[in-house]
Amino acid sequence: MFTFIIKRFGSGLVLIFVVTAITFFLTSAASIPIAINLAGPNATPEQIAAINADLGLDRPIFEQYVSWLGGALTGDLGTSYFTNEPVVDAMASRLPPTLSIVVVAMLITLLVSVFLGVAAASRRGALDVVIQAISTISYVFPAIILGIVMVFVFAITLRWVPAIGYTPLTESPSDWFASVILPAVVLSIGGIASLSAQIRGSMIDELGKDYVRTLRSRGVAEREILTLHALRNASGPAFTTFSLLFISLFGAALFVEKIFALPGLGTYGFTATIQGDLPVMLGLTLFSVVLVVIVNLIVDLVSGWLNPKARTS
């Protein structure tokens, strides 16, 4: 197991290096007029040259990347070109809104998907058809439209929750929940469709196996068979899907944050990309790759725990 973790860690470092290098060189090759964006369209050549020199943009591209990589290894991701704010501090201040809606969305996705998947697999017939129809509709229904509808109904008409904005958890847990529940529900819609379908398929396979028939012949309660035996054995593929959803929701959070005006990483990254704020773009890229590496490692470890065959392989 230790050797496996070391190999995964090494491959993760290689992935981080490759992805950040590609991002850096492609962004540099795009020739984004950063100096003009900072000084304005009427900037003189002297002003542009001075800004490029101050930011180090006049150095060779490879030297710029090595300088950034050296800082990243020590925890210094540079300073934003446009706000002069350290990238690490800026990301840390914007992570809670994004993490809040993603975590709440994952909880909603997990609870609803397990219920729908198990119910559809154990009660084949009309209920199964209805659940599959709901899952399909939720998968193809545009989340943006759903977000707008939910804002109009629950925020504007009923005034149960705020329409926009974010309240930190440390200030008021109730206001925090009110500010993240609508974005989280919108974010979870697509995940519920895919995860519930995965759980349904895996549960149907498990319920058709011999050990389930043996348990039923011994008089074991159906609820116990479903929850303690079939669901655990079916949770391997579902856990992989669930973990991949966690990664994808960080990307999908961009659109949700724009709808609900949340000051999260998605909004921050969108603005940085438009401006050509390279330190911020690289910082967010590094965060995303590290997140992928960590989640994949956790998936492999948990899959080994759930499935002894995967553990030995």
Image (cartoon, grey):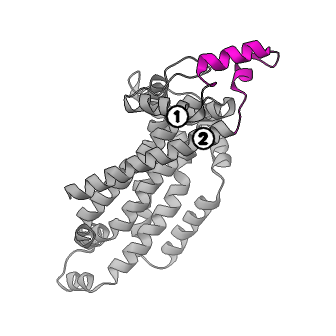
The stretch of residues the image draws in magenta is 30-58
Q: Earlier in the sequence, mark 2 or mark 1?
A: 2
- Up-down: is 281 above or below 205? above
Q: Which mark is residue 240?
A: none
Please tell me in which quadrant of the rendered image residue 274 appears: top right
Q: Residue at x 45, y 68 (%)?
A: 198
Q: Residue at x 51, y 63 (%)?
A: 194
- Up-down: is 279 above or below 254? above
In-image side of 28 versus 203 (left or right):
right
Find out whether residue 19 is within the magenta segment: no
Task: Please state the horizontal and vertical placement of residue 173, each as a whole percent of the image.
Answer: 39, 28
Residue ranking furthest to the left: 218
* Residue for badge 1: 65
Q: Residue at x 25, y 73 (%)?
A: 309
Towards the viewer: 298 or 80 = 80
Q: Residue at x 44, y 37 (%)?
A: 99
Crowding at dot 2, Cα within 10 Å, few <14 / some 14-19 / many 20+, comes out as some
In-image side of 46 versus 59 (left or right):
right
Visible in this render: residue 265?
Answer: no
User: What amino acid does circle 1 point to?
Assistant: Tyr
Find out whether residue 39 is within the magenta segment: yes
Query: Are discs 2 and 1 less than 8 Å apart at CB?
Result: yes
